[in-house]
Image (tube, rainbow, N blue to C red):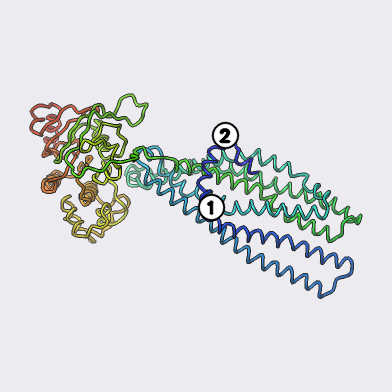
Amino acid sequence: MFKNILLTGNRLPRIRNALQLVIPLFIKYRLRILVGFMALLTVDLLQLMIPRVIKSAIDSLQFATASPASLLQHGMLVVGFALAIACCRFGWRYLILGFSRMLERDLRNRMLAKLVRLDRPFFNRRSTGEIMALSSNDLAAVQMACGIGLVSCVDAIMMTTAALFFMAYIHPQLTMIALAPMPILALLTGLLTKLLHRRFSRVQEQFSRMTEFARSTLSAIRLIKAYTQEGPQTGYFAKMGREYVKNNLRLAVVQGALFPFSTLIANASLLLVIYFGGRLTIAGTISIGDFVAFMTYLFLMTWPMMAIGWVTTLFQRGLTSLDRINQVLMEEPVVQEPLAPLPMPLTNRRISVRNLIFSHVAQQHEPILDGINLEIPPGFLGIVGKTGSGKTTLCQLLARIYPVAGNQLFWEDIDVNRLSLAEVRARIAYVPQDTLLFSDTIGANIGFGNPDADQAEIEQAASLAAIHDEIIGFEKGYQARVGERGLLLSGGQRQRITLARALLMDRPVIIIDDGLSAVDTDTEHRIISNFKEWLPGRTCIMASHRVAPIMAADQIVVMEGGRITDRGSHHDLLDSNRFYKTIYNHQMSTGGAGN
């Protein structure tokens, strides 16, 4: 059976890799597992002894040697075995099923540890719903396979082996007759295993899509209601649900075929034993006690025969899910730590970009950034350009979110690829274009990057971001909850809370990617004015499609088509750059907000 499970198609190398996830856990908890299986073995042995007691009692009745005392003795022996079986059964359930829960916990922890290490390219490829499905359905399938599935498998092997020994001891020829239908079951299991894997994979993939759709629908519920798309969204989800049910039914056809056929084979064996064993009993070849004991042993084998299909299903689902989990755990961050990182420069005088070329995928014909050269000393650098000009990508590369080729990005003339990734990121506070707030209090969101900050420091950061006065105007002030993804706040409030979070981290470099786009002009001016007091000794890099937030920058670079087309101060660019002057005049004529 196991050979059929493992050798399905060309999956053996992947299955071997996947099994390496759980083998160390089996070693770690080996004592617990060993004691659990000893309790299971004891249960099986005691169950196998009961038919011997029954045989002895029946033979004593047949040969008129029984007495009330001997029958009572036999009965008490069965009761004693039953009590011992109950105690040992509790033991193996607690130990082995408990181990499966520990295995599930350890895999979940390992998975989370891996996920928080992975970088943006991985999450661009994998949806949140798929990851949630791996953390729920797939882990549950692995837990079932390593828990009750493993117990059932070992139990079936031990029970079958021992029962066969006792049956052969009673009558070898009758035992061979009872086993005659078994090759049919083995052949059927082998044929259905490959089909089972394929259909279960399809079910898990559909579950991932449904989970992601449900998550994205709930996240965008306000937009859906604003566009009155409740009906279409519900209809599409119902369609996905019908597809999920259809895939599950197709899977159930395979699973459903295994159990009835296993039962049919078991009952066929029973019918053969009744016919041929009955004839042997009538002929006096075996005693009535032997016949009853043989039938009891066959009944003990019936469950293992019927369980073959169920155990095969559990193992197949568990291996499929383990393989899916392993594919995530085998992922590595694209931005790698150097093997022997150089010490970080003690000063923070200059960041240099030299002939930087970048594409998100190797097959991309035109690079997103092409030949960027830029010197960034401490102070205020502004980056302006149209949507799609490469501003955000440049900010993400500076923040070490995406990998940079060697000799293209330098800190104090040291290639960033030779510096510790964690230490470089620890010098940078990054405010992304898309604000993200947790469903928590305002104070907790601001203090997220600096958990040790006290209330005074949180309020100071909020004041710098020009949001403090609005926060204290809320009923609960800094203890007010912001709702899912900050939906109870306006876009400008979310941006300023995100900015306050970055300022509270008090890092030497802050990168703001269009982080004031939803802020009104007056508030924007207050923030920039606050920046002038906060900035000395630090580096601020602010990208914006508007001119107003970066007018006070020491240097402004103009980007177009992934290239820097001009650079200089605000006044220099107004005099020399037609594009810059055009967008400045347009934005000023519309109130300067661009909102």
Q: Is mark 2 on a helix, strand or loop?
A: loop
For badge 1, the amino acid type reads Ile
Q: Position of residue 29 (x, y in %)?
A: 53, 56
Which residue is at a point 31% across and 53% down the rendered structure image? Answer: 483
Residue 27: numbered disc = 1
Q: Where is residue 30 in the image (x, y as percent from the top left)?
A: 55, 55
Q: Which residue lies furthest to the top in this view?
A: 365
Kind of residue indicated by mark 2: Asn
Query: Which picture quadrant has residue 10?
Result: top right
The residue indicated by pointer 2 is 10
Camera-side residue: 332 or 214? 332
Direction from residue 583 to residue 51 in the image, left or right:
right
Residue depicted at 30% across the width and 39% down the height:
401
Name the front one of labels 2 and 1: 1
Q: Which mark is residue 218?
A: none
Q: In which quarter of the image is the N terminus?
A: top right
Residue 583 vertical placement versus 176 (above, below):
above
